[in-house]
Amino acid sequence: KTCCATPRSDAVLPKVPRVEIAEGYDAYAKTLAIWAAKYNVKQAAIVVRNGGRVVYQAGIGGADPAAPVLLASLSKAITGACIASLVRQGRLDFETTLGQGLARFFKERGRPKDPRVERVTIAQLLTHRAGFSNAVDGVEPATRSVLTSYLVNHTTRAAPNAEFLAQQLALPLLNDPGTEFGYSNAGYFLLGAVIEEVTGQSYQAYCRDHVLIPAGAKGDLDPTWAVLGAAGGWRMTGADYLAFFEHVYPTHEALGPTTLTWMLDPKDKLIGNSVPRSWYSLGVRMRDRGRGLEMWHTGSWRRQLAPDAHGPRSADTSTLAVRVADGTSWFVHSTPLVFGGARNELARELLRARLTARRQP
């Protein structure tokens, strides 16, 4: 499986067993436990936030809801927020091209093999419309063939370097930029490189100082899988991620008016043919089902590697984050990961739990 892939939003979902929901926030844990048993998930933890604070957290199978975990593709929202901060400062625009944003990199390392790459825009990278081979094709090279080749001479424990980016840029695009949605990690690796070129800082340092700290959140690149970088490499606790996630919800003033307007406009961002329509914006999926705006994303990473001198490197994990219009948000981490409609089902059932739960004293 490819890194950090999100399930199709129009997938046919299995029926979930109907259960009596417990009163109070325990409804979340009960829903999670039923789902975990159905899909043979060994460990899972949930953190719920409302009113600017964590109101509930629980773990099953020995999972610690307060432990930092690899976010996988939930990292994309952090990258998106970093881009938004540069847009707010006037240092980037959504229509900035890679030819502009990576001008120095192309001068030093050579131009990309496919000339269309240079006219790919920041907006197209953010919304997975840059034209790269993607997870749906089953050949997403950024975290498969390219990463495998790169790791022959490099460690998983360090952020990706220029050689990794150059290997990605040696491949042709699958589609013309802007023509269709294709979920791909390559675009977010490139956004990380743009952040570094524009700011002169490391990707991790800039995002920490300009996004996470202002949001009151702590995080770092995962000590084992830092190589996933801007596409999937962050490690945080559920509580810290939800504090950050609050700042990405498209009413928060921290994003700035330009980004807020862009996020709320589904034009050139739609995903599939699901009803209601969903769209992809700042590293998150969004939709409005008549109860206000919902924002969510999933993350996945499975890779079996031999231990190195520093310890184990294998991973088998998944994450889910959701934020709804009434200000409630939740973060779920589970292992082993499950694909297909299972996590869509969990998201739906946790929404039902939220509607029936009552705040505990």
Image: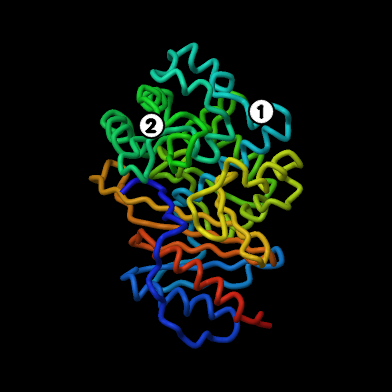
Q: Residue furthest left?
A: 306
Q: Secondary structure at mark 2?
A: loop
Is the residue marked by circle 2 packed among few (<14), some (14-19), or many (20+) residues within 10 Å? few
Vertical comparison of 346 with 279: above or below: below
**Residue at the disc numbered 2:** 174
Q: Are marks 2 and 1 in contact (CB under 8 Å)?
A: no
Q: Which sits in the foreground, 120 or 26?
A: 120
Q: Which sits in the foreground, 280 or 77?
A: 280
Q: How many marks?
A: 2
Is the residue marked by circle 1 packed among few (<14), some (14-19), or many (20+) residues within 10 Å? many
Q: Nearer the viewer, mark 2 or mark 1?
A: 2
Q: Position of 351 compared to 180: left or right?
A: right
Residue at 39 percent across and 75 percent down: it is 15
**Residue at the disc numbered 1:** 92
Q: Which amino acid, mark 2?
A: Leu
Name the image quarter holding residue 141.
top left
Quick one: label 2 or label 1, which is nearer the N terminus?
A: 1
Q: Which amino acid, mark 1?
A: Leu
Across and down, in percent, residue 45 comes to 46, 68
Across and down, in percent, residue 295 comes to 59, 57
Vertical comparison of 303 with 28: above or below: above
Vertical comparison of 278 with 120: above or below: below
Across and down, in percent, residue 236 comes to 52, 53
Residue at 69 percent across and 26 percent down: it is 91
Q: Which sits in the foreground, 54 or 171?
A: 171
Residue at 73 percent across and 35 percent down: it is 88
Residue at 33 percent across and 61 percent down: it is 336
Vertical comparison of 271 with 115: above or below: below
Q: Quadrant of the C terminus?
A: bottom right
